Structures are given as structure tokens and as C-alpha cells.
């Protein structure tokens, strides 16, 4: 297994909902802005897909393959992997509330974990337990995370 250097670009975007039940005037600029990032991998947070993931997959498919953990109108994360990348996803891990998506994958000859996170905005820290438990099962791999970790002060 090679975990050597990668020449891959990343970006992260908080979407404040990609649910396409809104007007096209609001949704189309969001999709265009995401596509114009032109990075190899894009981490999306606060996607709120609510079952509309196929519409977003269709909107981005010319440039990206989408993986997501977003099934409600709250929270949600996604990872867009550029079509030009040589990649294979071996395994996906998702938490139950749309805060985490982890992909154990290969990019070129490197095996690694790529993850999108959207931290809690309350005192629920289950996401961090999920992350720790998941990453410990892949403790021999490098990992790259993106998204919004939020901050909760108490």
C-alpha cells in the first residue's frame, strides 16, 4: 500500500442547503459556484438534501461524482470527487444524523481516508465519538478532512 505524496487540490463549502425545493434563482448560483471551485475534491457541509440527492448528482456529474450523507432537511455532508481523478472508493462510513461521511479510498496509488464533517452546533458530541471509532479502525491510513467543525462554547 502506497501512502506517498498526492498532487490533489481541495476546497470546502458550506452550502446553507442544496435542497432544490427553492427557486432556481437561488439554487442555480449555488451549483455554479461549487462547480467553479475547480478543485479535485470538494467537501460540502450543510447540504440538507432531503431526498433530492439525484438532482444535485445530475447537476454536477459532468465534473464530479458525488458521495453524500444527507437525507433530511437538516445538516448533511457530501464529497465531490473530480471525474479526472484516478480513484476508487472501497468503503463508506456515515453517522446517523448527517454530520460525517468517511471514504476509505484510493487516489492514484495512494490509499487514504477522505472525510466531510459538519460539527454539531449544540452540546451533542456523538460525532466526535463516531469519528474516533471510525478512524481507529483505519489507523494505518492517512486521512484528510474538510467541512465545518463549528464551535460550541459552554
Image: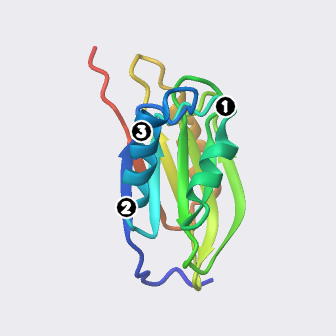
Circle nearer the N terminus (1, 2): 2
Q: Is residue 57 above or below residue 14?
A: below
Percent coordinates x, y for residue 38 in the rendering: 39, 67
Percent coordinates x, y for residue 93 in the rendering: 67, 47
> Whole-Å distance between the Cαs marked 1 and 2?
25 Å
Percent coordinates x, y for residue 46 in the rendering: 46, 34
Q: Which residue is mark 3?
A: 15
Q: Which residue is mark 2?
A: 36
> Whole-Å distance between the Cαs marked 2 and 3?
14 Å
Q: Secondary structure at mark 1?
A: loop
Residue 134 visible, this orientation? no
Q: Secondary structure at mark 2?
A: loop
Outermost residue toward the top?
A: 154
Q: Callout 3: 10 Å neighbours few (<14), some, many (20+)?
A: some
Q: Secondary structure at mark 3?
A: loop
Q: Quadrant of residue 61?
A: bottom right
- In front of the other: label 2 or label 3? 2
Amino acid at each position: 500500500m502506497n501512502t506517498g505524496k498526492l498532487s490533489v487540490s481541495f476546497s470546502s463549502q458550506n452550502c446553507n442547503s442544496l435542497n432544490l425545493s427553492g427557486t432556481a434563482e437561488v439554487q442555480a448560483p449555488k451549483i455554479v459556484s461549487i462547480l467553479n471551485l475547480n478543485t479535485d475534491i470538494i467537501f460540502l457541509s450543510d447540504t440538507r438534501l432531503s431526498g433530492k440527492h439525484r438532482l444535485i448528482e445530475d447537476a454536477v456529474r459532468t465534473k464530479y461524482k458525488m458521495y453524500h450523507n444527507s437525507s433530511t432537511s437538516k445538516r448533511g455532508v457530501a464529497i465531490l470527487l473530480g471525474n479526472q481523478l484516478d480513484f476508487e472508493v472501497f468503503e463508506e462510513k456515515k453517522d446517523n444524523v448527517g454530520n460525517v461521511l468517511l471514504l476509505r479510498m484510493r487516489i492514484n496509488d495512494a490509499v487514504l481516508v477522505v472525510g466531510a464533517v459538519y460539527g454539531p452546533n449544540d452540546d451533542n458530541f456523538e460525532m466526535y465519538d463516531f469519528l474516533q471509532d471510525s478512524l481507529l479502525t483505519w489507523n494505518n491510513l492517512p486521512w484528510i478532512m474538510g467541512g465545518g467543525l463549528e464551535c460550541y462554547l459552554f
